[in-house]
Image: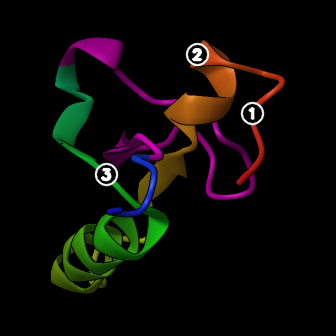
């Protein structure tokens, strides 16, 4: 039996403040993709983070969407 799908979403963009998590412009937030596992999401996150390393305000995040969809789920 295949592993249970655990939906993860990767998003990112420029933050108002490098010490915070508030985006400068929500219209410019990039949806990188939806992934069936943390490992797959982490690979996508890492690629985007490395591609924007010269922009101090750029940040990408992994959202554990499976926890939002089913808060009682494990994983």
Residue at the image point whose x is 34% and y is 45% from the top: 12
Residue bearing mark 3: 36
Residue 13 percent across, percent down from the top left = 31, 44
Taking depth in this image into account, of 73 and 2 the one nearest to the observer is 2
Residue at the image point whose x is 32% and y is 63% from the top: 2
Position above or below: 35 against 67: below
Task: Assess disc 3: are there few (<14), some (14-19) or many (≥20) residues with their C-alpha within 10 Å of its C-alpha.
Answer: some
Q: CA distance from mark 3 to mark 2?
A: 14 Å
Residue at the image point whose x is 72% and y is 45% from the top: 20
Taking depth in this image into account, of 46 and 50 the one nearest to the observer is 46
Q: Is residue 16 magenta?
A: yes
Magenta range: 6-27
Q: Secondary structure at mark 3?
A: loop
Q: CA distance from mark 3 to mark 1?
A: 15 Å
Taking depth in this image into account, of 14 and 70 the one nearest to the observer is 70
**Seen in the image, is 47 located left or right of residue 64?**
left
Res. 22 visible in picture: no
Residue at the image point whose x is 65% and y is 40% from the top: 21
Residue bearing mark 2: 69
């Amino acid at each position: 039996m295949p592993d249970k799908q655990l939906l993860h979403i990767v998003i990112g963009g420029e933050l108002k403040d490098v010490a915070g998590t508030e985006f400068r412009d929500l219209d410019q937030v990039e949806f990188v993709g939806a992934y069936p596992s943390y490992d797959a999401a982490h690979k996508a996150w890492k690629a985007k983070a490395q591609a924007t390393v010269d922009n101090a305000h750029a940040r990408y995040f992994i959202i554990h969407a499976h926890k939002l969809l089913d808060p009682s789920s494990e994983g």
